[in-house]
Structures are given as structure tokens and as C-alpha cells.
Image: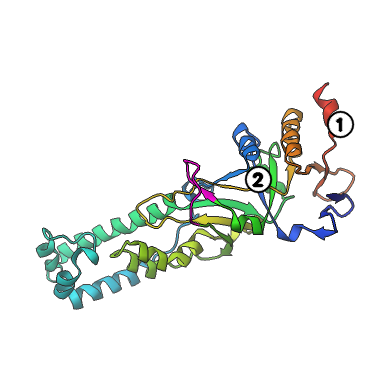
Amino acid sequence: MILSKKKSVIKIQGGIDMFEDLLYRYRSGDSASIEAFEKERLYFSTPEFFNDPFDSIAYIDYNRLWYNINDDLDHHAKETLERKKKELFPLITDSNQECILKLFNDPKTRSEFQKTVDRKIRYISKKITINSKIICFSEEYLSNLMWSHYANYHKGFLLAYSKASLKSAGLYNHEHILLEQKAKLKKVIYNKYMPDFSEYMYCILPNNTREAIQQFRPMLIKMLSSKTEEWSYEKEWRLCSLSDSIESEDPAAYINISPVCVFVGARMEPPERWELYNIAKKKSIPVFEVWCNSTEPDYKLNFCTLDVKELKEQIHE
């Protein structure tokens, strides 16, 4: 692999430009992230631990939702309760069926029913957030902000992966068993407004089954890969994995995949650089170092091949 410092472009043998097909994963540089690199693992996380409180949530139009629910209740109450019962609404049981029939004449009972459904909506929304699995990547590898936010203030490192290998990567559970399912690689869409989840919620409330989840999987993926425009500078991609049931956590724990190359941060200490270099050397993976160029006026990160000779001297100082 040849590095052109002048253009800061990596080319593999044969002169093929790889950058258009690569996505990048920023790492903190702690022992866990270095160990994961050595084992060629990328671990999934859940949106509840991300730094955006709006992450993986969707807009629900309660007026429209309740209009649909009330319309169903007003027009199909008795026959629906007899024909569907628990299949239609999980909260309807034989013991409370008589109570629910009073909805049509008792405003207080209707209000209590609405509170129950509201709790169910919040429950489903939270379950989707904590049970979905995501690995985050970026199109950018020289972003000053992301090196600071996601790579321990430039003390960490960055791994590059091809999109094709991410799409075909095998998923493993916590017992290190290969799963049959595949994750979905999606480019994050940045919008002013959240995706509208109202119709999905109306359909999933009464029928939280595997078939219902599969039917609305594209909507769930859209929700997991949508963010506000304020985050657009990250140019993010996400590898998403979903459980077959809202009630259960997705079993995916990590993917097993080898990076194309490694970048060490501008402030990474020599011992950590040396450790990364030796791991990469065993895997025949090239290592590059990011640096700040003070000979040019613009605030722009640069990179070059890791100077192993200089690094050895620093280690033995």
C-alpha cells in the first residue's frame, strides 16, 4: 500500500482509490478498544447510551393515534372484543372485558383506558430504544471534532472498514455463536423533523408479534438511522440489528471483521502507538499517524505513514 503525502490519499497496489468505499470507526484508545482491535471485533451498543437524547426516537401524533383508536372503539367495540380479545389489545382480558365495554358511556373509564394505552406507548418506545443494536461509523477520517469527541481528545485511534465487508460481516452473540441474522448498513439521514411513528404505533399496539415487527422493520430501521440536522457534520453510517420481538433484546453482541488500515491520533502516547503498531504488523495492516501541520494557515488535520524509526526512539528515551 502506497501513501501519497501530497494528496493525502491511500492507494492500494494497482492504484485503486479506496476512500470512496471506506467507513471509519473512532476508538478511545483504552485497553478494551485495543483488545477489540486485536480480536477483530466491533461491539454493538444501544441508543440509550448515545450522546443525543433524540437518538432513535420518533414522533407520535397522539391526536391522530387516538382518533384511530376511538374510531375503532366506537364502531367495533362489542364484536371486536368478542372476536379479537387479547389478540387485538394485550390489556383486554376476560376479567376486565365488562369494564372496557363501559368506555362508550363512561368518560372516566375512557380516560383511564387512554392512560393505559399511553403507558403502553411509552413502554414500547423505550423497549425499541434499549433492545436495538447499533455500531456507528463515519465517512470522515480527519474530522477534528470527531477525533476530539470519540477518540479521547485525539489520544485514541481510528479503524477503516470497507462497506462491502460490513454488509456481509457475521454477527455473534455473547456466547460467541454465529447468528443467522444479518445487520443492515444504513446511511444516517439528517432532518429537521423526526420520522413519524404514529401509524406503526397504532398497528403494533394490539399485535406485538414477530410478523408485525417484520412488517414494520423498514420503519424501525429508518427510526434508528435518523438524526437532527445539527449532527450532519458527522456524515454517519450505522450498522443496525433488530430483535424479532420488542420484548426481547437483540442477541447480536459483535461482528467479526478485519480493518483495512489504522490511524493513530495526533496525541496518542508512544507506548500505545507501539502496541497498536505491533498488533497491526501481525495482521499485515498498514498504520498511519494523524498530525497537525503548522506550516499551513488552515486548521486541517493531515496524515502520513507511521514513522516506526522515530517511534522506537521515543519509546527508548
Residue depicted at 60% across the width and 57% down the height: 168
Residue depicted at 45% across the width and 58% down the height: 57
Bounds of the magenta span? 171-181
Q: Is residue 265 left or right of residue 170?
A: right
Please tell me the numbered disc located at residue 172.
none
Q: Work out which quarter of the rendered image holds the C terminus and state it.
A: top right
Mark 1, other Cα within 10 Å: few <14 / some 14–19 / many ≥20: few
Name the element at disc 1: helix
Tell me the kind of residue under disc 2: Tyr
Q: Which residue is mark 2?
A: 26
Task: Give residue 156's quadrant in the image.
Answer: top right
- From this viewpoint, is residue 308 visible? yes
Q: CA distance from mark 2 to mark 1?
A: 24 Å
Residue depicted at 34% across the width and 72% down the height: 64
Please tell me the numbered disc located at residue 310.
1
Residue farthest toward the top in the current orientation of the protein? 317
Name the element at disc 2: strand
